[in-house]
Amino acid sequence: MLSRLTRPRALAVCAVPVAALLATAVFAPLPFSVAQPGMTADVLGENKGTPVITISGARTRETSGQLRMTTIVATAPDTRVTLPDVVDGWFRTDRAVMPRDSVYPSGESVKEIERHNEEQMRRSQDAATQAALGYLGLDGKDVEVSLKLADVGGPSAGLLFSLGIVDKLEGGSGGDLTGGRTIAGTGTITADGTVGAVGGVALKTQAARRDGATVFLVPKAECADAEAELPEGLRLIPVTTLKGAVSALVALRTGKGSVPGC
């Protein structure tokens, strides 16, 4: 024989599994990573006590100002990201929620991802050196460049590495590329000097401004992303090539020629 439940009792009985489902949804891990502005490093100076750029086989010059490469920090691939984390990230300008597969290669362990990022950094450094020496018309067999940046992986520092090499070897039109400013930026680079997009630029502009930059070099294709959360006092300069980046910095320093903008 079945007994009839009163309406309040029926609602109470139904509420138990609903509450359990909601609790599961709130605390279940989700396939996202949460990123925030990371460290920046002056490629013209030292990082953790070691010069970022060391050059032998050619005369180098003293530089002023800073060229700061920028990074983002994302939750580790094995970190549990839950619904509250995602909601919090969506409503904060200093956080970004991204699909985990867009940040880390899927199906790989933490160690494999670390090795992958280290290899990307090594290739980026090689391409940056080739691009800079090629721009300057120097032979890579006579000039040796060593690039060291601790605890940073990936290819996005390529442009700043190239600019740092150019500044240390030649500068631009008789002066420093920076003009004494703190200039930051991001962008991959190929051996022929082509600058490519990187992602996370809205967070990188925040890291740049936090660390004193007033100018930010951004791959032209990512202008809109950089403008989305642009910090006050930071000027964007879009670039597509190493040559164009050098020309823009020289024009900014000398006041001669046009400086592109987003």
Image (cartoon, rainbow, N blue to C red):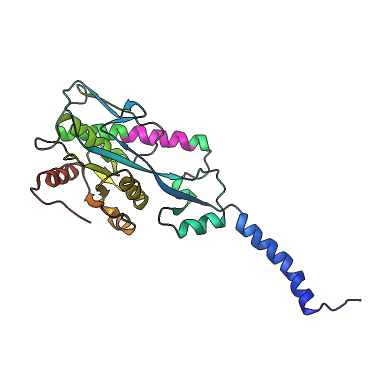
Asked whether, in this view, residue 38 is left or right of residue 76, the answer is left
Q: Residue at x 11, y 52 (%)?
A: 258
Tell me: residue 39, above or below residue 10. Answer: above
In which quadrant is the C terminus drawn? Answer: bottom left
Residue 171: x and y in percent read: 15, 34
Range of residues picked out in magenta = 113-124
Q: Is residue 201 above or below residue 59?
A: below
Quadrant in which residue 9 is drawn? bottom right
Q: Quadrant of residue 146?
A: top left
Q: Residue at x 44, y 47 (%)?
A: 103
The magenta stretch spans residue 117: yes
- In the picture, which quadrant includes the N terminus? bottom right
Numbered disc total: 0
Residue 84 lies in the magenta-colored region:
no
Looking at the image, residue 23 lies above or below residue 78: below
- Magenta stretch, main secondary structure class: helix
Judge by depth and name the residue closer to the eye, 228 or 65. Answer: 65
Q: Position of residue 235 (x, y in %)?
A: 23, 52
